[in-house]
């Protein structure tokens, strides 16, 4: 280390303040062969934070299925997974959390989450074409939740709308466990021509390194470290750890980045998210097996006199690091000048493996790149885990513990207006869902969002799913259900599931019971992804989602799934089509109300197992639904999820204005039949003339199926009883959230 | 007929507009970069939706001073056709090429959804091919779309046939409930006194492709082609 170094050497106390463990401090000392200075220690603290290193999760993440017939880039290889979708095109997609920033600064926290995930896509050379998000909030009636929700939704909207990529799908779920710590997961999907992707790598001694985009400020310093601790009352004091977003810069950066790739001058490119310059320089260098000299004083800054560690750790948004082939600098500069963006050389690729950070010619940090990163020197921990007591306790629940309701209408009204089931239009009307003119679901709603690929016969299907209540009840089954529901949504919309990205939101991993939830969820995800041949292409882990005073959030492994419609005309909507059409249920009914919205919020029974689920049964239902859709006779298809068969039928009715007339099956309790959430069930409708054809296909599949009744009139009729008009239910469904929010 | 779609750095509906004009309507269409002043011989200039220069100040406030707008204003003043959609409409208002202003929605939220609009005449460049009494389903997507003009201006515009579209319900009734953003007199689209500059908040280019299951917006593009003699 240079003798001129002015900084005092660090101690284990400093290390602990930066979030490192004493043994990690010792490890750093042995890597460097000396005591690190403050700048170096800061670099290690962010790179070895959970957020960047996955140190507490990577052992289990590696057990997830990565291989699939269409994988071009597997999990961990690039910024996002890459799936071959045919016609010479690939789809890049990823989901990421921004929970902690959103907890204390909802607007900027959510906005920068959207910005970050889109950069992950276009840094690979793919143009984002669609965005989705998965949100979890606390009790909607609390003022704090409403403040968080308004900020988060406006943040996502303002950023995504200006950026100009449609938000085509998502989910919103409310539960008290999210009162302090909301979950904000954003997903982006992009398209790129195969062979035109760019890697996040750095090589070729002497090649110049450029920083492009926004100037670097003091925002977001230690953001990655902040994301790796529990949220507490004091977290608001960490406000400088939250970044500020500028979607206009992001839009310019998108266009300029895609344009600069076309020049052929780019060796490698990586966006700057968590841990800013530190992360991009070290990850690219480690991947390309080269070193780098970085001149921090050349970095355009917003404030004067920024310290080396501040420049290194800043999480200022809308920035990229680009390694350019020497001699082609002019072409790169021309593109960024066209888009009026900063483009400054801040370093050069060197031989060896060391990254040397300089400030005004003085060496301020010198670290081996590979020791910083996941798969290199970053620590890997095997955490202990233990089945929590509540798990065995929940299994004691029996349906007989709850009496059948006297007033079915009251249950129906409760469910259809419950914020977890009611229309989320208060949320999604604030998102531009139609820019790009590719959203095929706007006028033809389906279980998954369907996005047109212009100039091809194909369309993409996408869905984000996770029922946190199921996962809490049984993490392994619950997570397998999350994968299954995503796949079911895609299948019901006419698509073939092809790949998964995940966002694993859990509590503190040092709590063995929380870690048990994590491990169990991974096992469930593995099994389901193997079954559906949907490899996990990447994603993100967010631990520490708990408040110090309310315990952990419901474990929430959000599944983002992509599927392909080889023929976009197979797009199948969920709305009823014609008076007189026949309604069939594919799959098996059960006397099961476990973990249903009905049991949880109507009967207020909080402890019960996950709903009935069998992976093979689920898979077989998908195959049957695919066959019926391919036959061309299906008028509508909609999967049974929250709120059971009743909500399923009512949603199809609300979308069309057409009523239904069905009979329940006397072999089951009526409440279980109507409101139970047993999995692996899909409702389809066909024209009367096609009923025989449908029955033939279903019989040949060997599956259980049953006729429910007919699309008929304008009312909701069950067992010859009229429960009211579709328009009455529609009004409840559409306005219940906005009534609360606009109060 | 040659169409030119202006591209500001924050435009995000430019590609959609080009796609409809060239791929669906089959017209020669070029993009006009904001830093240039040359309109490349285009007959119809379209200002698309988006966030021109970020629009952190006020939508369209900076765009009106861009180099390309010099050419656009000259084109308009010579009687050339200019059509602004959403952010393009905001830019036209800021530039004074059409009367009025676009204020923040009454709900103070961005709103994106399908709405219905009704043409207020059937002889303008945008409305001549729209079936009489038909409510068109066209999406909106804006945070600042509440049309405002003072009473005197409104009176003149009404008398002069400058109000092109009003928000209505599915049946074509112009009601308060059908007004998504609080626009004065439910106004969704207008033109200048010379009837060569047109602006509207709803996005007809988002309702012109059959794969999206809504082609109501095509009537507007067909109207342009009919009025200019491209379509019989």
Image (spheres, rainbow, N blue to C red):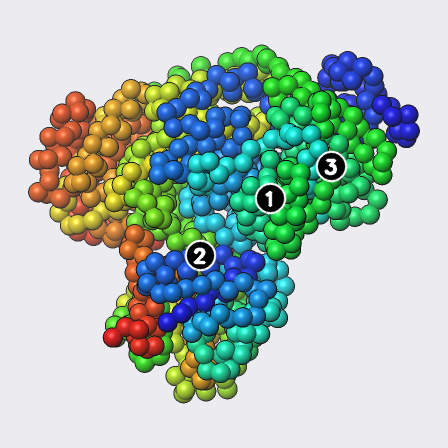
Query: In this figure, which residue is indicated by the disc labeled 3?
Result: A347
Q: Which residue is rendered at x = 64% and y = 39% of the image?
A: A324
Report in which chain the residue with disc 3 lies: A
Q: Nearer the viewer, residue A252 or A95?
A: A252
Decide which of A494, A600 is in the foreground and name it. A494
Q: Quadrant of residue A66?
A: top left
> Does residue A697 appear anywhere in the picture?
yes
For the point 57% across and 15% down, the residue is: A512
Neighbor class of circle 2 (other Cα within 10 Å; few <14, some 14-19, many 20+) is some
Point out residue A489 in the picture as x, y percentages from the top left corner: 33, 36
- The Cα–Cα distance between marks 3 and 1, rounded to whole angstroms, is 27 Å
The residue where tag 1 is placed is: A112
Q: Secondary structure at mark 2?
A: helix
- Classify the position of the N terminus of chain A by image quarter: top right
Local SS, label 1: helix
- Residue B112, position as x, y percentages in the image: 44, 57
| Figure label count | 3
Mark 3 residue element: strand
Q: Nearer the observer, disc 3 or disc 1?
A: 3
State whether discs 3 and 2 lie on one chain: no
Q: Chain of mark 1?
A: A
Q: Nearer the viewer, mark 2 or mark 1?
A: 2
Please name the residue that numbered disc 2 is placed on.
B15
Q: Same chain for marks 2 and 1? A: no
Query: Residue, x 16% and y 40% (percent of image)?
Result: A633
Residue A285 badge: none
Mark 3 Cα-neighbour bin, 10 Å: few <14, some 14–19, many ≥20: many
* Callouts 3 and 2 close, C-beta under 8 Å: no
For this orientation, the residue located farthest to the front is A327
Could you say where residue A345 lies in the image, as x and y percent from the top left? 72, 42
């Amino acid at each position: 280390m240079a003798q001129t170094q002015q900084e005092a050497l660090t101690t284990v106390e400093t290390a602990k303040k930066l979030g490192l463990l004493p043994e990690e401090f010792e490890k750093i000392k042995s890597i460097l062969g000396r005591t690190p200075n403050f700048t170096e220690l800061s670099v290690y603290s962010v790179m070895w934070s959970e957020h960047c290193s996955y140190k507490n999760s990577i052992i289990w993440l590696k057990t997830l299925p990565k291989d699939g017939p269409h994988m071009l880039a597997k999990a961990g290889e690039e910024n996002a997974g890459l799936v071959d979708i045919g016609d010479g095109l690939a789809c890049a997609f990823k989901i990421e959390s921004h929970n902690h920033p959103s907890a204390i600064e909802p607007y900027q926290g959510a906005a920068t989450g959207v910005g970050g995930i889109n950069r992950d896509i276009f840094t690979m050379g793919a143009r984002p074409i669609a965005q989705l998000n998965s949100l979890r909030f606390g009790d909607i009636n609390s003022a704090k939740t409403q403040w968080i929700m308004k900020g988060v939704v406006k943040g996502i909207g303002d950023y995504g709308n200006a950026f100009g990529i449609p938000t085509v799908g998502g989910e919103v779920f409310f539960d008290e466990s999210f009162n302090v710590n909301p979950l904000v997961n954003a997903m982006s999907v992009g398209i790129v021509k195969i062979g035109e992707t760019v890697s996040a790598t750095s090589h070729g001694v002497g090649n110049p390194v450029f920083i492009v985009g926004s100037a670097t400020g003091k925002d977001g310093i230690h953001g990655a470290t902040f994301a790796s601790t529990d949220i507490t009352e004091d977290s608001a004091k960490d406000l400088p750890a939250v970044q500020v977003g500028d979607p206009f810069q992001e839009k310019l950066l998108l266009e300029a980045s895609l344009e600069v790739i076309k020049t052929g001058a780019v060796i490698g490119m990586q966006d700057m998210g968590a841990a800013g310059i530190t992360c991009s320089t070290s990850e690219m260098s480690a991947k390309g097996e080269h070193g780098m000299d970085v001149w921090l004083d050349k970095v355009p800054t917003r404030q004067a006199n920024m310290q080396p560690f501040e420049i290194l750790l800043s999480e200022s948004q809308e920035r990229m690091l680009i390694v350019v082939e020497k001699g082609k600098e002019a072409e790169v500069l021309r593109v960024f000048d066209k888009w009026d963006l900063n483009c400054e050389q801040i370093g050069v690729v060197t031989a060896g493996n060391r990254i040397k950070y300089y400030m005004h010619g003085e060496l301020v940090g010198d670290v081996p790149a590979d020791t910083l990163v996941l798969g290199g020197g970053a620590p890997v921990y095997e955490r202990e885990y233990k089945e929590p007591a509540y798990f065995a306790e929940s299994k004691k629940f029996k349906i007989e513990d709850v009496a059948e309701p006297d007033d079915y209408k009251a249950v129906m009204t409760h469910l259809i207006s419950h914020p977890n089931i009611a229309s989320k239009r208060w949320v999604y009307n604030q998102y531009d869902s139609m820019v790009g003119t590719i959203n095929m679901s706007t006028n033809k709603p389906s279980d998954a969002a369907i996005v047109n690929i212009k100039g091809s016969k194909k369309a993409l299907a996408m869905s984000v799913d996770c029922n946190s209540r199921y996962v809490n009840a049984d993490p392994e089954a619950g997570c397998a259900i999350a994968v299954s529901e995503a796949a079911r949504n895609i299948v019901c919309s006419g698509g073939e599931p092809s790949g998964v990205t995940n966002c694993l939101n859990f509590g503190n991993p040092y709590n063995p019971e929380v870690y048990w939830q994590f491990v169990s969820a991974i096992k469930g995800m593995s099994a389901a992804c193997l079954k559906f041949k949907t490899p996990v292409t990447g994603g993100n882990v967010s631990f520490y989602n708990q408040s110090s005073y309310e315990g952990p959030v419901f474990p929430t492994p959000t599944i983002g799934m992509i599927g392909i419609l080889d023929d976009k005309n197979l797009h199948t909507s969920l709305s009823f089509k014609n008076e007189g059409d026949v309604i069939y249920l594919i799959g098996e009914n059960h006397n099961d109300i476990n973990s249903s919205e009905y049991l949880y919020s109507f009967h207020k029974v909080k402890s019960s197992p996950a709903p009935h689920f069998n992976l093979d049964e689920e898979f077989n239902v998908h195959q049957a639904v695919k066959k019926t859709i391919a036959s061309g006779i299906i008028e509508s298809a909609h999967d049974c999820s929250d709120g059971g068969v009743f909500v399923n039928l009512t949603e199809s009715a609300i979308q069309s204005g057409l009523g239904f007339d069905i009979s329940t099956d006397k072999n089951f309790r009526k409440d279980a039949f109507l409101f139970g959430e047993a999995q692996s069930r899909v409702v389809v409708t066909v024209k009367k003339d096609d009923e025989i054809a449908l029955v033939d296909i279903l019989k040949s599949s060997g599956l259980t199926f049953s006729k429910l009744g007919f699309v008929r009139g304008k009312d909701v009729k069950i067992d010859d009883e009229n429960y009211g008009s579709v328009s009455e239910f529609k009004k409840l469904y559409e306005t219940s959230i906005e009534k609360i929010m606009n109060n | 007929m040659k169409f030119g779609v202006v591209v500001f750095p924050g435009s995000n509906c430019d590609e959609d507009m080009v796609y409809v004009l060239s791929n669906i309507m089959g017209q020669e269409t070029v993009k006009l970069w904001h830093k240039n002043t040359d309109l490349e011989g285009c007959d119809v200039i379209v200002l698309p939706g988006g966030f021109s220069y970020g629009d952190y100040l006020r939508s369209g406030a900076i765009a009106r001073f861009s180099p390309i707008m010099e050419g656009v204003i000259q084109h308009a003043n010579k009687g050339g056709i200019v059509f602004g959609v959403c952010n393009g409409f905001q830019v036209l208002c800021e530039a004074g090429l059409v009367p009025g202003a676009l204020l923040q929605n009454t709900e103070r939220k961005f709103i994106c959804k399908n709405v219905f609009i009704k043409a207020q005449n059937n002889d303008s460049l945008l409305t001549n091919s729209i079936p009489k009494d038909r409510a068109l389903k066209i999406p909106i997507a804006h945070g600042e779309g509440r049309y405002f003009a003072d009473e005197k201006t409104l009176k003149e515009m009404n008398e002069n046939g400058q109000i092109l579209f009003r928000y209505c319900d599915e049946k074509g009734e112009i009601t308060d409930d059908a007004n998504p953003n609080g626009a004065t007199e439910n106004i969704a689209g207008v033109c200048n006194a010379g009837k060569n500059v047109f602006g509207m908040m709803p996005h007809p280019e988002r309702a012109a492709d059959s794969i999206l299951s809504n082609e109501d917006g095509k009537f507007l593009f067909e109207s342009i082609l009919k009025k200019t003699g491209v379509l019989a």
